[in-house]
Image (cartoon, grey):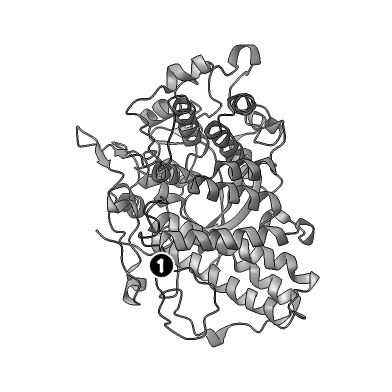
Amino acid sequence: MKYIKYTYLFFAIALFSACDDFLSKNPDDRAVLDSYDKIGELLTYAYPDQNHQMFCYAMSDNATEKVNGATKNIIMADAYHWREHHLTSQDTPEAYWTACYSAIKQINHALEGIDNFRVNGQIPSELTAYYGEALVARAYAHFMLVSLWSKSYNPQTAASNMGIPYVKEPEKQVLKQYHRGTVQDVYKNIEADLIEGIAYIDDTKYKNKKLHWNKDAANVFAARVYSVLGDFEKVLAYTNKVLSANPAQQIRDLNDKYTKMDVLEMLAQWSKTSENANLLVVPQYSNWFSYTYGRDIFGMSYDAYRYIFRNPFVGGQWIWDLYGQDPNIFIPKWQFHRERSGINASEGYYMIMNPLIQMEEALFLRMEANVMLNNFAAFEQDMNAYLSKRLKNYQFDTHAFSYEKMELEYRESEIYGLNPFYAISKEQRPYLNCLFDLRRKEFYYTGMRWFDLKRFNVRVRHFFARQSKPVFLEPDDNRRELQIPSNAISNGITPNPR
């Protein structure tokens, strides 16, 4: 473990002034979209500017409770105990809900503006890329909402499980009543927006395409959606649009390029749009960065690190090292910057540049699709490419994938218990257990683990420092769906059962 001295920042959770809900602003306050440029400018607000990763991380089994010496964060404490959140500040579920619907509001306003420029029903060529970006952005915001506030997709129950309001029209009245519909309705709308939007996306229209929905990012997002729907032929088709036959050249070069950097350089590089692996990078208000996820009582403990990042099934050592001093330890991901506000230059909000879509996700989704389609040779080729960038001193002759090595580590046990709505064969199961575990390592801190636990209906295990036995959140526990924010409930949206 590498020990580096840091002067840790002590800060309170920054509060932000959010509107009471996504309907609280007078629709007449909207900007007049009388030029193409104004539509493009409006779409810079089509991305949620709040972050979900802190509370998703804390709800998952990646989090643990440290015994001594760490800082307690109320947001993470509420999430770790799977209880109703006390705060509405940044990094909370309510902040993220509001940010998603705020983005949707701007998207629908932009789409209305585009419609007003149609000539004989046709969108002017100058606006087609904006049209595609808006539709994919609308699909993404609703996808994140349904993933967090509704039950996981299951074709047997999707028509009866409550969804979230899928808003497709600009607001014309204050306090309009919205209804949740069903999970099935939401996914039909997501798929429709996504398919139509991808067809119009044009990467050449942007100075920096990675700050917008571009072709690669949208294709990976489509693959993510179809993995939830269990349509693995489409998952494979969309990931093949992004990945080459040699994906080792497309993912982060952690065991070469990154090893030549110090920790501050790594933190900076992680979120850069110049990083090949980053496909969509979005600025978000958040306190979830290295100082926080290293210092918090529910952050990584040394015991958790030794368990989650235990020796690879092919031998050797993982490339992920710890930094800091126990208990304030972390694996480098992204860093923060501060948006200044007020007269005092020391005042402001913490922000991160968040890589929402990464090439590694495409690779994992392609491997999963190949397993579900019984293309095991293709899986092996991609797995070797992945391992070649994630092991220290990687040598193919020593560290090459083999079924025997994998099966020894990932044979079925209660540790995994994957139970999606679709069938998994005995042969497929160790492959999926392997991917489930490797995704946990790769996407540590990002909150992706929570979505994996929901998608595969795996119970979540949390340990508490003063309890001898773990506490479990079972697959059918209603607390796996976040409670609808109180202000939305007050405006007529049906709450989740408890």
- Rendered position, 192 above or below 226: below
Tell which of 132 and 45 is nearer to you.
132
Q: Residues within 10 Å of mark 1 (few under 14, many from 20)?
A: some
The single residue placed furthest to the top in the displayed view is 397
The residue located at (75%, 75%) in the rendering is: 122
- Rendered position, 18 above or below 410: below
Tell which of 419 and 433 is nearer to you.
419
Q: Quadrant of the C terminus?
A: bottom left
> Going by the image, does 11 lie left or right of 273?
left
The residue located at (49%, 20%) in the rendering is: 406
Residue 299 x/y as whole percent: 39, 41
Tell which of 132 and 359 is nearer to you.
132
- Please name the residue that numbered disc 1 is placed on: 181
Can residue 240 be seen here? yes
Tell which of 386 and 81 is nearer to you.
386
Please identify the quarter of the rendering in which residue 69 is found: top left
Residue 364 x/y as whole percent: 57, 36
Residue 8 x/y as whole percent: 46, 45
- Rendered position, 409 above or below 181: above
Can residue 339 be seen here? no
- Rendered position, 377 above or below 364: above
Residue 187 x/y as whole percent: 49, 58
Number of on-image labels: 1
What amino acid is labelled 1 in the image?
Answer: Gly
Helix, strand or loop at label 1? It is loop
